[in-house]
Amino acid sequence: MENDLESTDLKEDLLTFDRRWSGICAAVRLAGLVAVALILARSQARAQGHESVPPQESTIQLMQPSATGPAGQLVTITLQDALERARKNSAQFLAAATDARNAHEDRVQARAALLPTLSNSTQYLGTQGNGIFSSGRFVTNDGVHVYREWAVLHQDLSPGAFMRTGYRRASAAEALAQARAEVARRGLDVTVTRDYEALVVSQRKYATAQASLDQARHFLEITQAGERVGQTAHSDEIKAELQFDQQKQGFEEAKLALESDRLTLAVLISPSVNENFSVVDDLDSPRALPPFTDVQAMAEKQNPDLRAAVESLRAAKFDVAAARNALLPSLSLDVDYGIEANAFALRSQVAADPRLGPQPNLGYFATAVLNVPVWDWGALRSKLHQAEYRQQQARVELSQTQREAVSNLYSFYNEALVARGAVESLRHAADLATESLRLTNLRYQAGESTALEVVDAQNTLTQARNAYDDAEARYRLALANLQTLTGSF
C-alpha cells in the first residue's frame, strides 16, 4: 500500500518537471527566433543601404557667463592688449605699484625733513583776574589778555640729518619698491602670455579635432559604402565607427578646453569676466632668441630680483646707521618771530607797568635744545642689534638671489633653445603626417591599405598637429620666462 502511494507521488513529480522543462524550452526557442529576426532585419537594412552613420547625440551645451557688452560687439585682442588690460585688473600688480608710489612719497617726506620748516601760530590767552594784580591769577602771564602771533622756524641738527641717513634709507626703499613692482609686472606678463597662448593653442586644437572628426566621418562613410557593395570587410566598418566615436569625444574635450582657457584669460583681462572677445593667433610669427652673451649682459643690468636684493641690503645698512645715530647727541633749533603782548598790536602798554606807555611788541626769541642719551635700559642698543641682524639676513638673501639668477639664466635659455628646436622638428613632423594620411587614404581606396593603417594615420596627424601647437606655445612661454631676467628683447 505504501509502495503504491510512493509510486503515484513520483509519477506526479515527473509530470510536473516535464511541463516546466517544456515551458523553458519554448521560451528559449522564442528568444532565439527573436534574435534571428533582429539579425536578419539588420542585415537586410545594411544590404539595402538604409543603415548610415549612427545618429549623433545632441552637442553638449557648455555653460558660459552672459555677455555684458553690447550684443554682437566682438573685440579682437592681441597679446599686447591682453598685457595692458591685465595690468589694470591685477590686484597683486596694482598693490606692488601702489607700494612703489607710496615709497616715492616717503622719499619726498624724508627729503623735506632735512630742510627747515616754517609755521605760523596765532594764540589768545585769557586769564581770570583777581582785582589786585593786573596780571590776573596766573603768574605765567603778564595780563588778563595775552596775544601771540608767532612765525616759527624749526631745524633738526641731529647726526641723522647731517648724514642724511633717513633720506638715503627712503631712497633705497623706493628703489626696492620699484624693483618689486617690476618683478610683479614681469611675473604678470608671464601669466598672461601663458594663458593667452594656451587659448590660441586651444583654438588650434579645436580646429584640429573638428577636422579629425570630419575625416573620421568621411572614412566611416567610405567603409559603409564599400561594405554595401562587398568591397570591404565588416571589421573595417566597425573600426571606422570606433574611430568616429573616439574623434567625437575628442572634439567635445577640445571644446571644453577651449571654453576653460577662454574663461581663465577673461578673469585676467576683464573686470566683469566678459568672454566676448577673440585673440590673434600669432604663434607662427617669428620670435628670435638672442645670443647667450647678449642675454647674459641684459640679465646683469636689468634683473629686477637682483636689483631688489641689492636695494634691500642698502636699506638695511642705512637702518644700522640710523640705529647708531640714535646713540649720539642731537640738537634742534627753534626761532620764533612775532608778538606776545597784552594787545594785538605792534605797540601797546604792558599791563604789569602801564606807566611806561606803549612799548614795541614785535621781536624774536630762539630756543636751542641739546638732547644727550644717558640711560635707556639698553633699548637703543637692542634696536642696533636688530638692525644688524636684518643687515646680515639681507646680505645672505642677496647672495642666494645671485646664485638663483645665474641658475635661472642658464635654465631658461636652455629651455628656449630646446623649445625652438622642437618647433622646427614638430612642424616637419606635422607636414609628414598630413602627407602620410593623404597617401594612406588613396591606398585604402585602391585596396592596398587596411582600415587600421588609415585610423593610425589619422591619429598620428592629430597628435602631430597638437604637439606642434604645444611646442610653439612652449617656446613663447620660454621666451617670456627668460625676459623676466633680461627685460624685453
Image: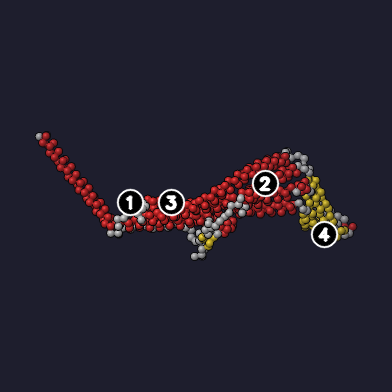
* Residue 235 image label: 1
Give the labeled residue for mark 4: 343
Q: Which color scheme is applied?
A: secondary structure
Q: How crowded is the residue under tag 1: few (<14 C-alpha within 10 Å), some, or many (20+)?
A: few
Label 4 with label 3: CB-CB less than 8 Å: no
Q: Residue at x 19, y 44 (%)?
A: 21
Q: Compute the Cα span from label 2 to label 1.
A: 71 Å
* Label 3 secondary element: helix
Q: Residue 234, percent across and down?
A: 31, 52
- Identified by mark 3, the residue type is Thr
* Residue 460 image label: 3
Q: Compute the Cα span from label 3 to label 2.
A: 52 Å
Task: For the N terminus, give its image quadrant.
Answer: top left
Of the numbered discs 4 and 3, the one sitting upstream in the chain is 4
2 vs 1, front mark: 1
- Identified by mark 2, the residue type is Val
Q: Residue 285, percent across and down?
A: 54, 57
4 vs 2, front mark: 2
Of the numbered discs 3 and 2, the one sitting upstream in the chain is 2
Q: How crowded is the residue under tag 2: few (<14 C-alpha within 10 Å), some, or many (20+)?
A: many
Of the numbered discs 2 and 1, the one sitting upstream in the chain is 1
- Identified by mark 1, the residue type is Ser
Q: Compute the Cα span from label 1 to label 4.
A: 118 Å
Give the labeled residue for mark 2: 310
Left or right, residue 263 beside residue 178: left
